[in-house]
Amino acid sequence: MGAREPSSPWLGGPEAPIRARQAHTMARVTIELPQCRYDVVIEPGALENVGETVRSRAPHDRCALLADRTVSDLHGRSVEHSLRRAGYEPVTSALELGEANKTFDTVQRLYDVLLDGRLERRSPVIALGGGVTGDTAGFVAATYLRGVPLVQCPTTLLAMVDSSVGGKTGVNVPQGKNLIGAFYQPVAVVIDPLVLATLPPRALRCGLAECVKHGVIRDESLFEFIRARLPQILAADPETMVELVRRNIEIKAAVVMQDERETGVRAHLNFGHTFAHAIEATTGYGKIEHGEAVSLGMLAATRTAVELDLCDKALLQRLEALLQAADMPVRVELPPDDELTAAMQLDKKVSGGRTRFVLPDRMGNVVVRDDVPPGCVRAGWREIRR
Ligand SMILES: NC(=O)c1ccc[n+]([C@@H]2O[C@H](COP(=O)([O-])OP(=O)(O)OC[C@H]3O[C@@H](n4cnc5c(N)ncnc54)[C@H](O)[C@@H]3O)[C@@H](O)[C@H]2O)c1
Ligand SMILES: [Zn+2]
């Protein structure tokens, strides 16, 4: 036999591993709902070609790029170039879009941008940024001219695995977070894991908390994947992130497809959140990040499940070990129990005066209970109180 052509990618020469890797660093998840269907594309470098995607889903001569200012400074230029290459004349708006600006005031300013840019019914809106941007720009797209095509380009891990899928959009009002909004599905979601390289580590961990949540509620192998690949995940390794994001979106999408308007299994996504919302409300919004509260909330909920004999203590230990390895908080200073209980009862997920808890009965499965004795909830708080 003659020697193999060393440089041929097909015969296993030196280039082969690279080609093989490239072939794997792309994923697509199709979301199918009764009234619409759209793709989530996950690929390193995807934002450089976002214009083509927008054109194929929402062909029109005008479009709007609504971006978080930080993200726009870091990554906006390549998105804008791509839109121009695809034949668009984008109107752009880079707003300070922190949680404090997730308001009607911002919505009005974004309407002005679209109105001044004379965007029409078929003109797409591209939302580039984290969950705040996606929710706010998504609400604008849902309501401007009664709805224009929306392309979500999430740039935080939380937005990639959580807020960009499911169609919830909205803003905060003085009475509470996310109280005003609309269900509005995008025509496409474009995810470029390379942007995670610039995301602050604390924000990356917050997104990871929601990934751990998905593992606990639905998929033990995802939980194990996170554990095994933690160093790569915390370093935002692109290939690892494609797989992490894909697996999480598949879970969130499956839940949403089953229950688009949150009447049944979508409640499972609230695992850890009943406790988390009370932590956020009593410690003051902004002091503790949502993902950090979720980390603590998942531990409290799991302790509650142990007290109820729903699951054994090993599950709690496994969860705590992973959160600790990821440098997520597992203990926190808390106000007295009655304040926490009051905060829990104010949460909008309470129905008919009973607090509903999502509790694991084994790794990868949860049940919903609204008959949890106060003593078991107190044990949950005790678990995470510093
Ligand atoms: N719609 C839903 O279903 C849903 C689900 C979960 C959360 N949310 C909402 O999502 C919001 C939280 O989203 P978030 O955590 O993405 O916060 P965020 O949008 O405020 O982003 C966090 C910070 O990261 C910065 N940032 C974003 N991407 C970056 C990048 N690639 N590099 C550097 N910096 C970057 C932003 O400028 C911001 O300062 C909340 O308002 C929450 O209510 C919505
Ligand atoms: Zn959450």
Image: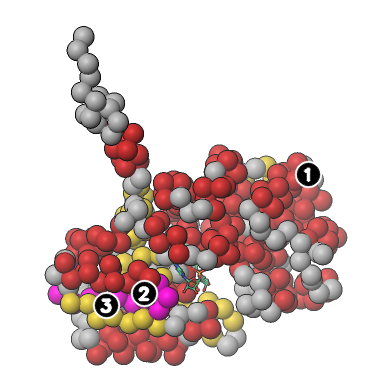
Does the numbered disc 1 mark a residue whose Cβ is under 8 Å from ligand 2? no
Check disc 2 and give the amino acid type: Ser
* Residue at (82% x, 51% y) in the render: 307
The answer to which of 305 and 322 lies nearer the viewer is 322
In the rendered image, the quadrant that contains the C terminus is bottom right
* Residue at (44% x, 83% y) in the render: 96
The answer to which of 364 and 152 lies nearer the viewer is 152
Q: Is residue 375 above or below residue 22?
A: below
Q: Which residue is the site of mark 1?
A: 313
Could you tell me residue 2's position as x and y percent? 19, 12
Residue 71's disc is none
Give the residues drawn in magenta, as a range: 59-71
Q: Which residue is the site of mark 3?
A: 64
Q: Earlier in the sequence, mark 2 or mark 1?
A: 2
The answer to which of 367 and 168 lies nearer the viewer is 168
Q: Earlier in the sequence, mark 3 or mark 2?
A: 3
For mark 1, give the secondary structure.
helix
Check disc 1 and give the amino acid type: Lys
Could you tell me residue 274's position as x and y percent? 67, 65
